[in-house]
Amino acid sequence: MVAVTLLAGSAIAGTAPREPYAWEKEGPAVPEFAIKPITGHPSLLMDPSGIPGLKARYEALLGHRDSSAMRLRSPVEFLIYADEASKKKFSADWMRGALKMLEQPEDATLSSCRRHSEAIYAYDIIAALGFLTDADKAEFQRMMARAAAVFVGPDPAHFASAKTPLTTKVESPKGFNACNRWTDSYVLAGLYGLEFPDAPFAHDYVRYAVMQTEFQLDHSVWPGGAWAEVPRYHNAALMIWIGWFDALKRRTGIDFFQDPRVKKLVDWPVRFSSGLVRFPEMVKTSPKGEPTTPAWGDSNYGKEAFSTCAMYAPFYAGSDPAFSKRLMWMWRRAGSPNQLGWQFDNVFPQIVDPSLPDEPQTLGSAYSREPGYVLLRSGFDTPDETVVTMRGGACANHRRDDLGSIDIFSHGIPLACGAQSSAYKGPEMFWNRWVGANNAVAFVGPPVAEKPANPWITDPNLQSVHVGKPLAFFTRPTVDFAAADC
């Protein structure tokens, strides 16, 4: 993304110059832009002209639906299948439920605003049904303004900045503003500004969200493409960003998709995917097996990350067809997973184009130096493909004591796996995060005390956090090598 220096004063032409706000002084420059007016709904991820083709795309993704027998659930399904009476009732029911949910008090230090983003994507579709009243729209806008004020700030003079953070809770080695929950917060504010461009401070909320996106691309994405947190939240960041990037490009022309940092982030799950693995629960549904991403830290084995490949692929079909084909290949290799639940009942079918072509890829070994992520691969796409992963880098948010841990997948079998994640509460959380639940060598004494200490592990020699450092990595056609100090 090309940055253009923002002159002191408002981004809106014709207003008097002013002293820059604190966040403007501290943050990266933002290009000048205008928000296109809304001429009809939906307006974020598609425009009304796309509605006729939505049914065919939806059924290609999820299978043919018999609308006479199906139970309609999501706003997209009502937009495609419902009769006028059903649309009217659903609009009224949804509005009551949404307002009840949004009326709940919020604390930006404790709660996530993902339900608010879910609501704004749903609202954008429900407004297209044609049955929301002016009063409904005004009340929903008021609730979204309240949420943006809570999670980002009530006006530009009070937007959160590095020196005046919204919360003092630190969830990342680089601070709260580098973690995925901050992504949630500013993206909500940006979506609010795009959905209600005539609202007070709408342009400022969008500009602020663009600036924070630039900040996170600088501070939350390692040069090798890994997110500063663990793989689960790498995928969470991609999912939070996809709708924001799409809506921002449509409504302002600002295009983050072509940013090399974004492309590396999108490609990371491809590079760090395993071979086709037959986990016990997959034997019946996927007899050939499915790839998985690493389960380092608070992450799980699974194919969820590969649904993001299909979501990002359409945005490279014209500018980088080879990359688009690579992403579609990865999606299909993983069994074409859908991303539903949360906001994606509405987002996924609007964005993904299942007709895009793919192209077979050859994957090798992979290395992310800064977080110490290593994947060693041999025999790609053969029955005896073997993948060994190792983590030997700095601790991150949502970490476990799995530095130095090794996972092995061979001949389609998970031979050695860690404990994965669990509910974020004890004792399960503490057990899964314990070094003894992972395939790691535990180096004892002198320990570095955990903060907070793990109450379920009584051996003081194991109450420790080891900060590792990758020492060496090289890959050749016949041999791979990696070493780390854990």
Image: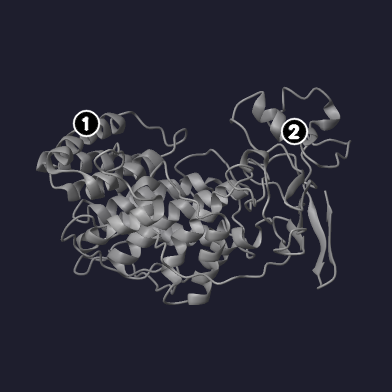
Q: Say which element carries label 1.
A: helix
- Does the CB distance between marks 1 and 2 fall below 8 Å? no
- Whole-percent x and y of residue 136? 15, 39
Quarter of the rendering occupied by the N terminus: bottom left
Question: Label 2 belongs to which residue?
Answer: 434
Marks 1 and 2 sit apart, C-alpha to C-alpha, by 44 Å
Q: Is residue 477 left or right of residue 397?
A: right
- Whole-percent x and y of residue 381? 69, 63
Q: Label 2 neighbourhood size at 10 Å, few (<14), some (14-19), many (20+)? A: many
Residue type for callout 2 = Trp
Q: Say which element carries label 2.
A: loop
- Whole-percent x and y of residue 211? 42, 60
- Whole-percent x and y of residue 241? 44, 55
The residue located at (38%, 50%) in the rendering is: 63
424 or 283: which is nearer to us?
283
Q: Which of the colour schemes (rainbow, by chain, secondary structure, one colour) is used?
A: one colour
Residue type for callout 1 = Arg
Q: Is residue 259 left or right of residue 405?
A: left
Q: Quadrant of residue 350?
A: bottom left
- 1 or 2: mark nearer the eye: 1
Q: Is residue 130 left or right of residue 262?
A: left
Question: Label 1 belongs to which residue?
Answer: 96
User: Which label's residue is closer to the chain start, 1 or 2?
Assistant: 1
Is the residue 143 above or below the residue 483 in the image?
A: above
The residue located at (20%, 51%) in the rendering is: 199
Q: Is residue 129 visible?
A: yes
424 or 276: which is nearer to us?
276
The residue located at (48%, 76%) in the rendering is: 321
Q: Label 1 neighbourhood size at 10 Å, few (<14), some (14-19), many (20+)? A: few
